[in-house]
Amino acid sequence: MGKRRFSSMEVTLLVLFLLMTATAVTMIALYFTREPKSIQDGKMKPPNTYSKTHLLNQTKE
């Protein structure tokens, strides 16, 4: 029996699959290991109570 050769499309799809898998694993790891913005220097900061639309409306006045 001869060796099975992969076509260029199969190799391309395999490379794309591996890149997407690595990207997904990286994004999941970053999601679970990130530090919330409200915690810095061991102290809790109050959440931002202003929305973006409130700030935009305030600049128009």
Image (cartoon, helix red, strand yellow):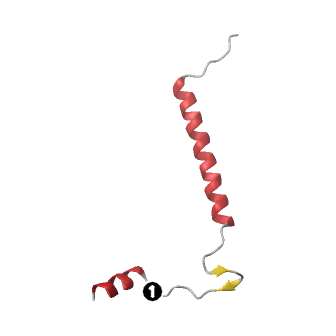
Q: Which quarter of the image is occupied by the C terminus?
A: bottom left
Left or right of 9? Residue 53 is left
Q: Which residue is mark 1?
A: 50
> Residue 31, image x and y in percent?
63, 64
Q: Quadrant of residue 38?
A: bottom right
For badge 1, the amino acid type reads Tyr
Left or right relative to 17: residue 33: right
**Would residue 6 be found to the left or right of residue 52 on screen?**
right
Crowdedness of circle 1 by 10 Å Cα count: few (<14), some, many (20+)? few
Report the residue at 68% width, 11% height from top. Answer: 2
Q: Residue at x 34, y 87 (%)?
A: 58
Secondary structure of residue under mark 1: loop
Relative vertical location of residue 30 with respect to residue 11 in this rendering, above or below? below
Residue 18 placed where, x, y %?
62, 40
Q: Where's residue 8, x and y in %? A: 53, 24
Q: Is residue 36 above or below residue 25?
A: below
For this orientation, the residue located farthest to the left is 61
Q: Position of residue 45 (x, y in %)?
A: 61, 86
Location of residue 11 by image quarter: top right
